[in-house]
Image (cartoon, helix red, strand yellow):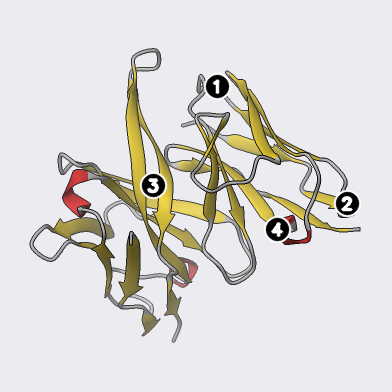
Amino acid sequence: EIVLTQSPATLSLSPGERATLSCRASQSVSSYLAWYQQKPGQAPRLLIYDASNRATGIPARFSGSGSGTDFTLTISSLEPEDFAVYYCQQRGTFGPGTKVDIK
Amino acid sequence: EVQMVESGGGLVQPGGSLRLSCAASGFTVSSNYMSWVRQAPGKGLEWVSVIYSGGSTNYADSVKGRFTISRDNSKNTLYLQMNSLRAEDTAVYYCARATSGYSYELYYYYYYMDVWGKGTTVTVSS
């Protein structure tokens, strides 16, 4: 079973700053990795699939990269609505999440 | 509009049963992979189960043998039958449509949850 680890657990940044989130898989998943955003009291929302493809309606400030075991989600310039928890996922496994909060 | 609405959550005693429903509109449940994902209070997301378009199923080890995923094509509805419930099953349960594909490199089907319901809360407590 593949294990996903995410770092950091919490990222404290200011609006307008760049956010870089990491997801590492215990074995290669090629490019079959997704990223989700979840805000308090809401269902998760798919941001990125196949490691680097933005889902429908996702702003261009969100980008994904990586393959094999190491993946990155980048938010180029944080908007107030981007402060949330972000999860990576591969098939039946989710990472533990990274919380992006306001510094 | 593509959407899913869960129902059936509530308070149940340990050892009891519940059946969750997820009514879909705007797409056909039987043509898609469909999944249940849960989130315990203050915790992260935990995948629970998937039913593939062909009808086969898969479960997390934590629920295997206790939970059953199914669908009613005539009602375009997904279900999760939960038996022998435990306190650790307390969570918000989300149903999700999954977009899928096959990896010839890794020899398996992969899937991502692209549409989510708002969730239904299950509380297991005496």
The one of B106 and A39 positioned closer to us in this rendering: A39
Q: Which residue is mark 1?
A: A27
**Mark 1 / mark 4, whichever is N-terminal:** 1
Residue at disc 3, secondary structure: loop
Of marks 3 and 4, the one in the foreground: 4
- Tag of residue A13: 2
**Mark 2 / mark 1, whichever is N-terminal:** 2
Q: Residue at x 33, y 70 (%)?
A: B5
For mark 1, name the chain. Answer: A
Is label 1 on the same chain as label 4?
yes
For mark 4, name the chain. Answer: A
Q: CA distance from mark 1 to mark 4?
A: 27 Å
Question: Do the residues bearing badges 4 and 2 touch, measured as CB atoms within 8 Å?
Answer: no
Q: CA distance from mark 4 to mark 2?
A: 12 Å
Residue at disc 1, secondary structure: loop
Q: Which residue is mark 3?
A: B61
**In the image, residue B80 above or below residue B53:** below
Residue type for callout 3: Asp
Q: Which residue is mark 4?
A: A84
Q: CA distance from mark 1 to mark 3?
A: 20 Å
Residue type for callout 2: Leu
Of marks 1 and 3, the one in the foreground: 1
Q: Residue at x 58, y 29 (%)?
A: A52
Q: Is residue B112 visible?
A: yes
- Tag of residue B23: none
Of marks 3 and 2, the one in the foreground: 2
Residue type for callout 1: Gln
**Mark 4 / mark 2, whichever is N-terminal:** 2
